[in-house]
């Protein structure tokens, strides 16, 4: 694996030190860093991160929610060797999403994550989401956990 | 111990780097570039190119510095146990209640 896409759950668990998944996530990101793997995010993953992180911030009754989100996102974007990638804009590429949904039994948003990876030649995927099981089993992407 | 040659232009030592090693370890090669200072890429026992760090503009972090940065950037928020991956998925799915069938 030379490139690894970070799913939004990785971002949430990396920033929330109280999460039972924080330690494993930190180990994963350190391992990727040590082995020279480039890490990637998409606006779709950031959107999901902001949605769920905001939910956790609200649950703690923290009032300055936008300051918290801004700081958390800033620190994520500061991670070494991190790049932002986008989905392709070609008409034909959009239709691949439906094929991925059917072939790998993915939700639309997860199929879009897969499309972003494949269209940007990203070979690894870091997630705790078991919905990507068929993708990993078919060796379309390498699981980074 | 790494074998070096002296670069004709910069007069700095360059570490010899077989192209097959570069092919299989490109990430590590560039990770170590700042520390090594430069490589002379070799194919069939001949030097065919050089890899040098960008001078001055940006300091390339070493592997150790990058790991320290990850540790510094991780955490920072204490928001309780939070959601499991499955619960998080359900949260997203609420937005997609009317999505296509799986």
Image (tube, coloured by chain):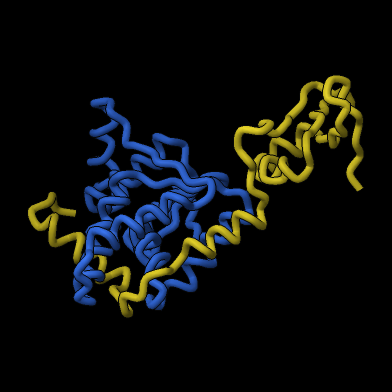
Residue lying farthest left? B98
Residue B76 lies, in percent from the top left, at 41, 69
Q: Is residue A1 above or below residue A92?
A: below
- On the question of residue B43 being in view, the answer is yes
Q: Observer-nearest residue: B62 or A92?
A: B62
Q: Nearer the viewer, residue A99 or A113?
A: A113
Note whether B21 is above or below A65 in the view shown: above
Quadrant holding the C terminus of chain B:
bottom left
**Colour applied to chain A:** blue
Residue positioned 37% across, 71% down in the render: B77
Q: Residue at x 10, y 58 (%)?
A: B97
The answer to whether residue B44 of the structure is visible from this angle is no
B43 left or right of A116 in image: right
Q: Position of residue A128 (x, y in %)?
A: 39, 65
**Residue occupying image coordinates x 23% and y 53%:** A107
Splitting the image into 4 quarters, where does residue B20 fall?
top right
User: Residue visible at 34% across and 40% down?
Assistant: A115
Colour applied to chain B: yellow
């Amino acid at each position: 694996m030379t490139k690894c896409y970070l799913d939004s759950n990785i971002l949430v668990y990396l920033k929330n030190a109280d999460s039972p998944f924080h330690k494993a996530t930190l180990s994963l990101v350190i391992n990727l860093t040590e082995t020279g793997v480039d890490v990637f995010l998409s606006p779709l993953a950031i959107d999901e991160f902001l949605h769920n992180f905001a939910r956790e911030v609200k649950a703690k009754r923290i009032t300055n929610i936008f300051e918290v989100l801004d700081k958390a996102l800033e620190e994520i974007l500061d991670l070494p060797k991190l790049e932002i990638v986008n989905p392709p804009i070609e008409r034909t590429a959009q239709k691949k999403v439906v094929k991925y949904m059917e072939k790998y039994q993915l939700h639309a948003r997860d199929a879009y994550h897969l499309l972003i990876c494949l269209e940007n030649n990203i070979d690894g995927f870091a997630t705790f989401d078991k919905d990507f099981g068929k993708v990993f089993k078919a060796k379309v992407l390498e699981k980074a956990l | 111990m790494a074998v070096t040659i002296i670069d004709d232009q910069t007069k700095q030592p360059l570490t010899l780097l077989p192209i097959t090693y570069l092919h299989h370890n490109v990430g590590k090669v560039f990770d170590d570039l700042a520390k090594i200072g430069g490589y002379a890429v070799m194919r069939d026992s001949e030097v065919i190119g050089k890899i040098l760090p960008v001078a001055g503009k940006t300091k390339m972090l070493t592997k150790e510095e990058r790991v320290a940065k990850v540790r510094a950037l991780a955490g920072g928020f204490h928001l309780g146990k939070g959601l499991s991956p499955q619960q998080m998925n359900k949260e997203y799915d609420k937005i997609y209640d009317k999505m296509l069938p799986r």
